[in-house]
Structure formats: structure tokens, C-alpha cells
Amino acid sequence: METTGTNLFLALFDLLFRDLLIVVVLAAIIVPLYFTRTAAIAVVRRNFKGYFSNPTGYVFLCVFVLLTSFAAFWPHQFFNANLANLNQLNQFLPLIMLIYIPAITMSIWSEERREKTDELLLTLPAHDFDIVIGKFLAAALIFTVSLLFSQISNFLVLASLARTPATYIVDLDIGLLTTNYFGYWLIGLSMLSLGMVASFLTRNATIAFVFGLAFNIPLVAAASADVIAQSSQIAQVISRWGIYSQFEDFQRGILSLSSTMYFCMIISIGLYLCMVLIGKRHWSGSSHTRVRIWFGFIPITFTHYLIRTAALIVAMLSLTIVFDQRDLVRFDTTRGKVSSLSDDSRKLIADLDPEHPVYIEAFISSEVTKEYIKTRYDLISMLKEFDTHEDIHLTILDTLEPFNEAVATAEENHGIPLLT
């Protein structure tokens, strides 16, 4: 659906219609569980209702919506950019998640242990998988509800700013907006899985919050690897495995298989670690044969699960690398397909000689006149799509100012003057 020439209600309907993608994903998981894992569904209901039966849950939800709205529109860069999109929120949302996600997960298991209800829960005729997946889905539903309120709130603000006063026509790229929020959803699910691991480690909710924050910080901080790593190549590799880098496709309105697999990898590892932690009651403190290592004695069962966890991590990392290098599915959801290449361009790139890679240097002013703002945004998005191909190496200098060293380089080496 196109939103050009539509009113507010049609644009909102378009947005909610596209949101069905998330509903379909959740339904594909929950419906089979409903018929095969009744214990898991019982855990989902118990935790979901329990969260919203407490006023604290509503406070956290309101704070999350408020923070996302402030991050999207409060800083002056949004109005300076003069674009009706969520570029500003894209930069701040992982930081907001660092606070909000641990607030959801901190009591998932620690509260059960504190109130001694974990023993009752574990005596139910249910597999450990039912407990873990039930609690994860409950947390996922809580986060999804929060994200839906945030999406509608930000949509209404964007629609009011992008509305033509005379005709009340709303000119928004709904495909881009929906894909942004689908990326937010995947970020949240991956952080939830790690936050659950933190909750399984302690009976204190505050400590679980701190652990959840600590476990997720590396994913966000990877974008600033150049501050720590002395080698630019090492910094680039570390940054590539961070949330910001993997979210970039969704930020531009691209649904890519490689980025989706990255977040699924984190979710899988997090849930498996939860399975190990909840299952340790079967072997911790028992009379298993012990093996001597340099720092003492550990159960063989612990060693077994440690090896299995390491093998899973290696397998998931390898699978993610394969999909990253062979990103076979890339769907452009933006209006006008401004973030994807034409068929002729793809054919031209496919015929490139790997021994002669292409190097692209783009010199772009930090500020342009109003009529070129959208052109600048589309150009950068298109260049980043070129950069997804291994035979093309891209360097974007998009913060050029008068008397900048890069400006002098562009003029001397390429004959590109800075137009003011």
C-alpha cells in the first residue's frame, strides 16, 4: 500500500496491516504450543497477567513510550533533518533498551526464587523447555505490547508533522516505519533472552537487573569498538557483530535474512543457557564423578554442558557468517524502493571480477539545502546497499564542513569542490 495521498486513518490502517508480520510470527510459535505444550501456555498466561496486574508494569510501559518519543523528536537534529522518519530514534533506541529490557526480565525467575515458588513451578508435570519458552514468550508479549504503544504514539506525531494543512493528506513511508519497528522487535527479543539468563543466576531482582544490563552492554558498545581497539580492522570486525551494525538494514527499510539470523542466533544461545541453568538442579550438588582441572574440581556434567554450549555458540556464529556472506533474501519495504538496487545494477555487480574490487568514496556535505535533504538521505541509503556486496568497498564522508581536511582531499584528488 502507498501512503501518498491518503488520510490519517488509511495510513494508520496501513501501518497496523503491516504489523501483522509480527503477529504471524508470534502466532506461528504460540499456536503449536497451545496444542502440544499446555504447560508452556500456562506459564505465558501466568507471567503476562502477573506483569500487568502490578501498577509497576504500567509505569515501565509509560516510561518506555515517553523515552522513545523524546528520543525520536526532542533533540533538535530531527527538525534540522526535516525528514519524517525515525532516524533519530534509531540511534538512541538500543540505549533505551538497555534500561527497559532488564526491567522486564529482572523478576522473571529471581522473583520465583525469592518467593520460593520456583520449587512449586518445577514440580509441575512439565519439561524444562516449557518453563523457559513460556517465560520467554510472556516477556516477548509484554515487550510487543510496549512496542505497539510506542509505534502508534510516534506514528501519530510523524503523521501530524507530515500532514498537508490544506488537504490533511499524510505523506509517510509506512514501509520504512514498520521495518524500523520490526528491527526494534528483534533487538528486544535478543536482549530479552540474555536478560533471562541474568534472572536465572540470582534470586535478587536488583542484581538481576544489573546482570541483564551487563550482559547486553557488549552488543550495544560494539559500535564504539574503535575507541578501545587500536587496530581499525579489529574495531571493524567487533563493530560488525554489534546491534547497531546488524540493525542497519532494518534502519534503511530492508528486511534481510542475514540480520534476522543474527538476532535469532542470540535468542537461541540465550534460551539454551536458560535451559542449562534451570536444568542444573538435576546435577548440581550430586555425586557425579569429578574431574581435576587447574582451579579445582568441577562435575563432569558441568563440563558436558559447557562443551555443548560452546559448540552451539560456534555453530550459530558460523551459520550467521554464512548468511552474512550469502545474503540471499533482501526485501526493500520502502516506498519507491529507494534502498535497493535495480536488476541491471545487480547484474553488473555480479559480473565484477573478484580480483579487481571496486572502491567508492562519497564526499557529502553535513548540511544541504531543503530541496536536497531527501536526495541526500536516499543517496546514502543507496550507497550502503552497494556496500553489502563483498567486491565493493565503501567510504562515506558525510560530515564535510568548510576548511575540513576531507574537503581539501576531495577537491585536490577528485576535483570535487564544496558547494555552499
Image: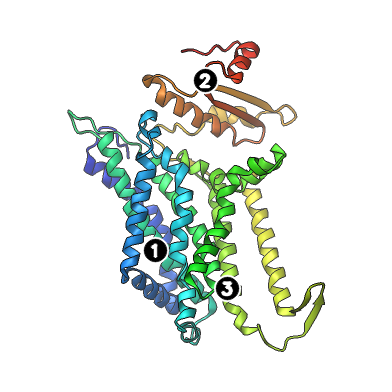
Q: CA distance from mark 3 to mark 2?
A: 53 Å
- Write the residue at 35% across / 37% down: 173
Q: Which label belongs to residue 401?
A: 2
Question: CB under 8 Å between callouts 2 and 1?
Answer: no
Chain-order first, disc 3 or disc 2: 3
Q: Nearer the viewer, mark 3 or mark 2?
A: 2
Quadrant of the rendered image containing residue 236 = top right
x, y percent for residue 328: 58, 44
User: Please, what is the three-letter code of the amino acid marked with disc 2?
Assistant: Glu
Chain-order first, disc 3 or disc 1: 1
Q: Secondary structure at mark 2?
A: loop
The colour scheme of the drawn protein is: rainbow
x, y percent for residue 113: 49, 79
Q: Nearer the viewer, mark 2 or mark 1?
A: 2
The outermost residue toward the bottom is 287
Q: Secondary structure at mark 1?
A: helix
Question: CB under 8 Å between callouts 3 and 1?
Answer: no
Q: CA distance from mark 3 to mark 1?
A: 20 Å
Give whichever of 87, 4 is nearer the camera: 87
Q: Secondary structure at mark 3?
A: helix
Regarding residue 18, the answer to whether it shows in the image is: yes
- Write the residue at 62% across / 84% down: 282
x, y percent for residue 274: 56, 71
Q: Which label belongs to residue 141?
A: 1
Which residue is denoted by mark 3 in the rendering? 275
Give whichever of 287, 168 is nearer the camera: 287
Quarter of the picture holding the N terminus: top left
- Write the residue at 49% across / 76% down: 131
Q: Which label belongs to residue 151?
A: none
Regarding residue 254, the answer to whether it shows in the image is: no
User: Please, what is the three-letter code of the amino acid marked with disc 1?
Assistant: Leu
